[in-house]
Image: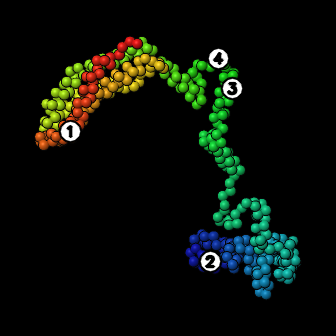
Amino acid sequence: MICPQCLKTIDDHAAVCPHCHAYVQAAPARKSYVFCEGCGARLSASDRTCPKCGRPAPGILSTDAAASDLAAGKTASFPKLTDAMLEGARSGRSARSSSVQDVLSESLDPSATNILDRSELDRKSKKRNPNRAEDPYHPRKIVSRRMLFAFSAMVVVACAIAFVWFDPLGVMPGFYQSVRTSAQESFPSREGMGGGEQTAEDVESDTQAEGSQTLEDQTLSDEAALAELTDLYERVVAVNEGDAFADAIDSFNGWYMASSLQKRQDASRGAYEVRDELQGIIDELDALRLMEGSPYEADRDNVRQLAQWMYERIDAICASWDVSLGYPDGESMGQHQDEILAPMREAGSSALNSYYEHVTEWRPQEH
């Protein structure tokens, strides 16, 4: 024979090559393998079907039975051969080859199949989990009971807060009042300490009481009325005879025709101040509260009339100042003289004459 290592001729029974000393003894027989005709997987001699695709091993089925059995899905029922069965077949105990019918008859369940019923699987799946989605690739999200309970609790709390805050039925004021009443009954010593809230009726009654008390406080007795009227009368006379009124007249006569707006504004300020002072005196006279049937009501009216005549005099000067101040700075005022003096000419001297006619006799006297 030829040495597989050095390719030289050696004795047929030699175990070692005398040339290269390579071991050339024939290797022990190895177990033969076959391959599945369907998926190409390697099968052993004891395999009757492919462990991957279930196809019968080559030589198991006859040509006539192979197609029908494969179509029926009965390939999974072939029993796996054991070493004892293979040894018996080789020793001659089984002279004939196994047919498809023999293999099927020897199986525990000849009707077994690897084809599963889809409707049966769906029925069992729904029975185990009835909420499972129909589409296994797009399962629906199942809301747990805890999440549902938490959401319901949040909704209830939100509704309760909204009901208390907006009070659609108007029950909260009565509830608050009942709480305050219970507190007052339980702790009577705390009443009047300023710690509680007053109702609208209490506030209104307190306001009316304060108003009536203030009105009584402002009502003047006859003696106080005489003193107050005398003071106001002297203030009116002081305005007429004082320097402020005379200065207001002089300022008007000297500056109402000035082209400078700033000078006119400065000169007019005194007249407006006198008018404000007289208006304050009139307001004080109107605010006097005399006792009912007081003999000084006529004196109050007389003093007010004197103040009103004085007010009309200074108001006419202020009206002329309003016209003069309406012209811009640098204006030639000569052409506007008649327009400026129009309010004073319209007022005339009736207020002045009436004032001097009654100022002496209307001085308040004790009654």
In the picture, measured across the screen, residue 213 lies left or right of residue 61, that is left
Q: CA gap, disc 3 to disc 4? A: 13 Å
The residue carrying mark 3 is 182
Foreground tag (1 vs 4): 1
The amino acid sitting under disc 3 is Ser
The amino acid sitting under disc 4 is Ser
* Quadrant position of residue 55: bottom right
Instruction: Determine whether 112 is above or below 188 in the image.
Output: below
Circle 2 packing at 10 Å, graded few (<14), some (14-19), many (20+), is: some
The residue carrying mark 4 is 189
Q: Earlier in the sequence, mark 3 or mark 2?
A: 2
Q: CA gap, disc 2 to disc 4? A: 133 Å
Viewer-side residue, 302 vs 269: 302
The amino acid sitting under disc 1 is Ala
Numbered label attached to residue 116: none
| The C terminus: image quadrant | top left
Q: Earlier in the sequence, mark 2 or mark 4?
A: 2
Viewer-side residue, 184 vs 77: 184
Q: Residue 3, image x and y in percent?
A: 60, 76
Q: Is label 1 in contact with label 4 (beta carbons under 8 Å)?
A: no
| The N terminus: image quadrant | bottom right
Q: CA gap, disc 2 to disc 1? A: 159 Å
The amino acid sitting under disc 2 is Ile
Circle 1 packing at 10 Å, graded few (<14), some (14-19), many (20+), is: some
* Quadrant position of residue 41: bottom right
Viewer-side residue, 222 vs 27: 222
Numbered label attached to residue 10: 2
**Is disc 3 placed on a helix, strand or loop?**
helix
Circle 3 packing at 10 Å, graded few (<14), some (14-19), many (20+), is: few
The residue carrying mark 1 is 342
Q: How many marks?
A: 4
Task: Tell me what residue is drawn at x 60 percent, y 69 percent.
Answer: 21
